[in-house]
Amino acid sequence: MAHEQQSPAPAAAPELTEPHEVASRLRVVTGQLSRRLRAAGENMGLSLSQAAVLSRLDRRGPATTVELARAEHVRPQSMGTTVAALEEAGLIERSPHPSDRRQVLISLTAEGTRRLKEAQGLREGWIARALEERFDERERAIMAEAVGLLERLAEGD
């Protein structure tokens, strides 16, 4: 069983209820977290955008480049670059669209699935270790609740 360590009390933060203050702090902390996650999976040779595409294909199945771009909120040209790199690495493959011969479907290869799971394991492992080492049970419960709220925020628009 892991040693339960009390976290130091956080610095006194002002009451954050004003939306612009919350937005500013959330922007900063998500940027920091993104950089930490990128570093945690750096040895996998997958950028966060590449891992996001592999993850989406794993969860939702084959998709066109345009569908992937829309889902990831990037331009189709940017997604084309990401898809080309993933295809060159043997992590995805293209196949004809079943109902529209002008389009191509992108899907995971077995190697793509393996690399995705490995990268997710590294990044999630970093988070799990940090949660275990730096936060007590009450704080982890708050984090779990915050994840649900962040998911709702991410669904917006």
Image (tube, rainbow, N blue to C red):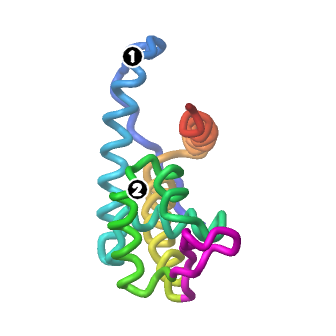
**Which tag, 1 or 2, sits closer to the chain's start?**
1
Q: Secondary structure at mark 1?
A: helix
Image coordinates for residue 88, horizontal then vertical, percent: 36, 84
Q: Nearer the viewer, residue 78 or 50?
A: 78
Q: Which mark is residue 76?
A: 2
Q: Which residues are magenta?
A: 94-110
Residue 22 to residue 10: above or below: above
Q: Write down the quadrant of residue 14 in the picture.
A: top left
| Quadrant in the picture for residue 104 | bottom right
Cα distance in 3D space between marks 1 and 2: 31 Å
Q: Quadrant of residue 84?
A: bottom left
Name above or below for residue 91 compared with residue 82: below
Q: Could you tell me the amino acid type at mark 2?
A: Pro
Q: On residue 11, which mark appears?
A: none
Q: Residues within 10 Å of mark 1 (few under 14, many from 20)?
A: few
Between 49 and 10, the residue placed more toward the observer is 49
The secondary structure type at the circle numbered 2 is helix
Please name the residue shown 63% across and 73% down the image.
97
Residue at 34%, 58% (x, y): give it.
77
Q: Residue at x 36, y 21 (%)?
A: 12
Q: Which residue is mark 1?
A: 20
